Image (cartoon, grey):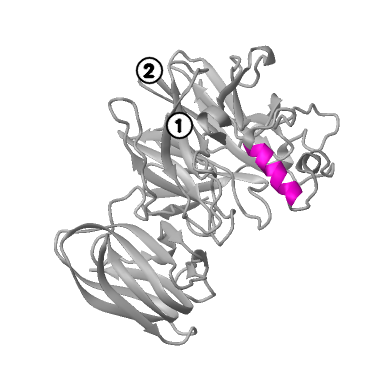
């Protein structure tokens, strides 16, 4: 168990990659986040889960492993029931494009690739969800063999034990308990499914499963189901591919937990967090009267190494959720004059620049690197009650960097030292008091790396 204090994005230290976060305020009043755990270079997720909790949105505890793949008795058991995930006989437009692209590039047929994988696989745990009912905590999980299951604990952080296989296949389970105590279970990819759970919270009747609650064609549904109720309205939150890739969290609403659902729009889009940004998965939750969206960003120039991030959101009187931008400030207030903004907190990147590991002995565990001319990096937001007078960056390498506060170009900074030396470059600026987005435009770059910035 480890504790950290932070109100900025990303929430957790750079070595802890917890994506797919489901946020729930549990009976003890703390917020608990249930997600997968990225620790591999070649594949999403890993063989374990870690639960994160906070009493105040500032102090974060990463608890000991709550469940491990090796604990699942049916995994790699040829006699265990198998329930398929994607229905290859009914390919969606996304699947058709994926198959066409794979074959055009001369690759093996993707259907055969998925169906003919080796029998022995690593026991990877994909995105989970958890809920409390009658003093017990039920963790619903899925694995890389399309199996889904549930394990139980007396504590919200686990460990979760006695896993049972559920009679369904696919990914990204979600659980919801309605006001009348009835629990519902959701899962699926490209088209979703929902069903009433039995009173034991560990079984359901396959005959009453409702298919196609939200779909790719009608709701831009990709994966990552999450259910909440606000007033009398049910909110189905999921990875949304309206913009061509499932980088957004979108939502659909209904007057019933099993639909029909009407598409309502996008809550947040993580496109631009990294040159390789691809997917998103998260949830919404109200904490002490404030609604938040929990989501992830990838890093290191890959679709992997996804990081927990948080933004404040609003639920309008008509029930809609206005889209919010990714920020560096996260759940906290804007950065104040003189506060150091680590470069790895950049919330939007364009071009080749990426957030990657720093070298041993450098200022921070991560930095901005891979910088090319015309790349940009954005930090949101800074705020001051007095005029802004100075901008400073700590960098390595050579380059010319133009600094903007919103659309105002406040200065151009020149870096001329060797790539082996960290130096500070600064300039006086003139900018009225107020709240601003900081944008760095790299006009020239030669082995240039950025470690932090300060405005005052």
For residue 57, which quarter of the picture? top left
**Please, what secondary structure does the residue beneath circle 2 have?**
loop
Q: Residue 232 vs residue 48: left or right?
A: left
**Segment colored magenta:** 94-104
Q: Are marks 2 and 1 in contact (CB under 8 Å)?
A: no
Q: Main secondary structure of the magenta part?
A: helix
- Does 70 sit above or below residue 330? above
Residue appearing at x 43%, y 16% in the figure? 255
Q: Say few, some or many: other residues with alpha carbon within 10 Å of mark 2 (under 14 / 14 to 19 / 20 or more).
A: few
- Residue under circle 1? 251
- Measure the alpha-carbon separation of dots 2 and 1: 16 Å
Q: Residue 357 vs residue 391: left or right?
A: right
Earlier residue among tags 2 and 1: 2
Q: Position of residue 88 (x, y in %)?
A: 74, 32
Q: Quadrant of the C terminus?
A: bottom left
- Residue under circle 2? 232
Q: Residue 121 vs residue 172: left or right?
A: right
Residue found farthest to the front: 104
């Amino acid at each position: 168990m480890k504790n950290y204090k932070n109100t900025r994005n990303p929430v957790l230290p750079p070595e802890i990659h917890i994506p797919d976060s489901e946020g729930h305020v549990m009976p003890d009043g703390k917020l608990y986040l249930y997600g997968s755990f990225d620790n591999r270079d070649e594949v999403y997720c890993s063989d374990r889960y870690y639960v994160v909790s906070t009493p105040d949105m500032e102090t974060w505890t990463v608890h000991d492993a709550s469940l491990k793949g090796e604990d699942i008795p049916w995994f790699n058991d040829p006699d265990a029931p198998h329930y398929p995930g994607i229905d290859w006989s009914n390919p969606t437009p996304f699947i058709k494009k994926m198959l066409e692209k794979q074959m055009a590039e001369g690759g093996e047929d993707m259907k055969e690739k998925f169906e003919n994988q080796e029998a022995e696989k690593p026991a990877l745990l994909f995105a989970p969800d958890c809920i409390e009912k009658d003093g017990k905590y039920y963790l619903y999980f899925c694995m890389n063999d399309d199996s889904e299951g549930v394990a139980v604990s007396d504590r919200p952080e686990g460990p979760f034990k006695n896993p049972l296989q559920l009679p369904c296949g696919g990914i990204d389970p979600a659980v919801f308990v309605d006001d009348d105590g009835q629990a519902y279970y959701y899962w699926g990819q490209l088209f979703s499914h929902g069903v009433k759970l039995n009173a034991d919270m560990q079984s359901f009747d396959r005959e009453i499963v409702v298919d196609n609650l939200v779909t790719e064609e009608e709701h831009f549904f990709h994966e990552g189901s999450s259910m909440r109720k606000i007033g009398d309205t049910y909110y189905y939150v999921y990875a949304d591919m309206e913009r061509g890739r499932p980088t957004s969290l979108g939502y659909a609403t209904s007057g019933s937990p099993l639909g029909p659902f009407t598409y309502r729009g996008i809550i947040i889009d993580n496109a631009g967090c990294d040159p390789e940004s691809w997917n998103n998965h998260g949830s919404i939750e109200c904490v002490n009267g404030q609604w938040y969206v929990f989501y992830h960003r990838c890093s290191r120039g890959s679709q992997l190494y996804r990081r927990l991030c948080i933004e404040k959101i609003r639920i309008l009187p008509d029930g809609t959720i206005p889209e919010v931008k990714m920020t560096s400030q996260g759940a906290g207030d804007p950065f104040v004059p003189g506060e150091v903004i680590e470069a790895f907190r950049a919330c939007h990147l364009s071009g080749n620049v990426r957030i990657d590991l720093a070298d041993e002995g450098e200022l921070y565990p991560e930095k901005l690197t891979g910088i090319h001319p015309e790349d940009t990096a954005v930090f949101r937001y800074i705020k001051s009650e007095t005029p802004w007078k100075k901008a400073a960056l700590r960098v390595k390498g050579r380059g010319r960097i133009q600094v903007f506060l919103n659309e105002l170009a406040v200065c151009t900074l020149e870096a001329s030292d060797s790539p082996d030396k960290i130096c500070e470059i600064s300039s006086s600026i003139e900018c009225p008091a107020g709240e601003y987005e900081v944008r760095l435009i790299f006009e020239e770059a030669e082995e240039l790396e950025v470690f932090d910035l300060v405005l005052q």
